[in-house]
Image (cartoon, rainbow, N blue to C red):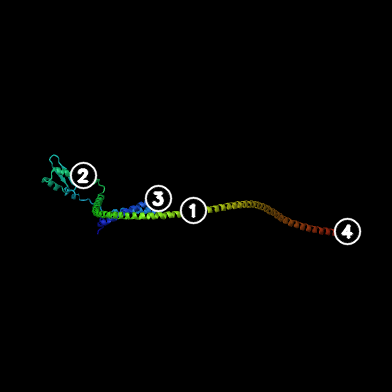
């Protein structure tokens, strides 16, 4: 199969139809990702635009649409080429000038008397209207597809009508059988209703007796339950009074404990403050003692210096006295 044959085949048209739909969805998703600034928007936009470029590339190989042969619908157009032929009518003598591929055949028909001037004029008007109709059509391929779809729908509707006729006949038979079944059922229900009413009448009497007996037992049970509840209520009332008195005593004891706790807490606070003051005083005493130690060391050093000085003075005085005594003896 050649390339042009493949591109014009129905399989390629089906593939391209699905490609257009799927590719358009990818392009729209890429634009949506980019507009909403979702993660990966750039990649989605590139995928969408790449898909659109690929679709345009593949659509370039599609063959152009073929113009249908209108001569099959309008036999008057056999042998004519509307795009190239030119037909002109002379009003005075009725002469006709025909140009194009089929002009000689048309002239022969007119000269032979098979066609008159009015028929040719109608044919010219029909060609003009056909040209206007063809120019107003936007896409003949879509019209052809719509026609095929319409014919398919008509065929389906025809099949559905046939099926509906068969179903209608079956429905009529079913209705007849259903009517007979209803009659039989009505008779059965009537006889069963009579028997049921008789049994219900007999059962109703016994049911009334049983219900009366059960009601008496229920009243007795309610009375005993009421007495028991009354005694329980009295007992609960007495216990409630005792419980209230106990709560009152407990509240008084808790109040006394609370006051004692407050007094103890106050004394503890006083003791803490006294301890803080004592600690501060001990710190001051320790500081003074440290200073006294340093002062005592200095005093000791000074006393030692003084003792040494006195020793030196004593030696000097002793020497002086010795010298003086020696001088006096001489």
In the rendered image, which residue does mark 1 sit on?
223
**Marks 2/3: CA–CA distance:** 51 Å
Q: Nearer the viewer, residue 309 or 78?
A: 78
Extreme left residue here? 112
Q: How many marks?
A: 4
Q: Residues within 10 Å of mark 2 (few under 14, many from 20)?
A: few
Q: Give the label on residue 293, or none.
A: none
Which of the marked residues, 4 or 1, is nearer the chain's N terminus? 1
Residue at 15% in and 45% down: 98
Which of the marked residues, 1 or 3, is nearer the chain's N terminus? 3
In the rendered image, which residue does mark 3 sit on?
36
- Residue 19: x and y in percent read 31, 55
Q: Give the label on residue 129, or none.
A: 2
Which of the marked residues, 3 or 4, is nearer the chain's N terminus? 3
**Marks 4/1: CA–CA distance:** 152 Å
Q: Of circles 4 and 2, which is in front?
A: 2
Q: Give the label on residue 328, or none.
A: 4
**Marks 4/2: CA–CA distance:** 180 Å
Which of the marked residues, 2 or 3, is nearer the chain's N terminus? 3
170 sits left or right of 319 in the view: left
Q: Of circles 1 and 3, which is in front?
A: 1
Q: Of circles 3 and 4, which is in front?
A: 3
**Marks 1/3: CA–CA distance:** 77 Å
């Amino acid at each position: 199969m050649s390339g042009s044959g493949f591109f014009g085949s129905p399989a390629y048209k089906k593939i391209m139809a699905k490609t257009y739909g799927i590719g358009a969805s990818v392009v729209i998703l890429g634009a949506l990702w980019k507009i909403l600034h979702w993660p990966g928007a750039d990649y989605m936009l590139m995928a969408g635009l790449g898909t659109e470029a690929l679709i345009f590339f593949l659509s370039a190989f599609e063959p152009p649409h073929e113009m249908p042969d209108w001569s099959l619908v309008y036999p008057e157009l056999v042998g004519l080429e509307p795009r190239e032929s030119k037909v002109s009518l002379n009003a005075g003598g009725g002469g006709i000038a025909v140009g194009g591929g089929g002009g000689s055949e048309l002239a022969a028909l007119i000269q032979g008397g098979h066609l008159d001037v009015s028929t040719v004029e109608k044919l010219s008007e029909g060609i003009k209207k056909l040209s206007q109709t063809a120019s107003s059509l936007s896409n003949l391929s879509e019209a052809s597809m719509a026609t095929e779809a319409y014919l398919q729908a008509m065929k389906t509707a025809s099949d559905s009508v046939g099926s509906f006729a068969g179903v209608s006949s079956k429905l009529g038979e079913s209705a007849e059988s259903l009517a007979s079944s209803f009659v039989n059922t009505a008779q059965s229900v009537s006889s069963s209703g009579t028997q049921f009413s008789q049994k219900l009448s007999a059962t109703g009497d016994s049911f009334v007796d049983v219900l009366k007996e059960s009601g008496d037992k229920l009243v007795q049970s309610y009375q005993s339950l009421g007495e028991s509840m009354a005694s329980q209520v009295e007992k609960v009332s007495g216990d409630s009074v005792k419980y209230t008195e106990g709560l009152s005593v407990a509240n008084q004891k808790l109040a006394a404990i609370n006051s004692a706790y407050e007094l103890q807490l106050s004394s503890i606070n006083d003791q803490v403050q006294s301890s803080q003051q004592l600690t501060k005083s001990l710190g001051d005493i320790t500081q003074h003692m440290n200073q006294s130690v340093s002062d005592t060391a200095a005093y000791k050093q000074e006393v030692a210096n003084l003792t040494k000085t006195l020793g030196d003075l004593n030696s000097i005085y002793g020497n002086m006295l010795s010298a003086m005594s020696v001088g006096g003896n001489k």
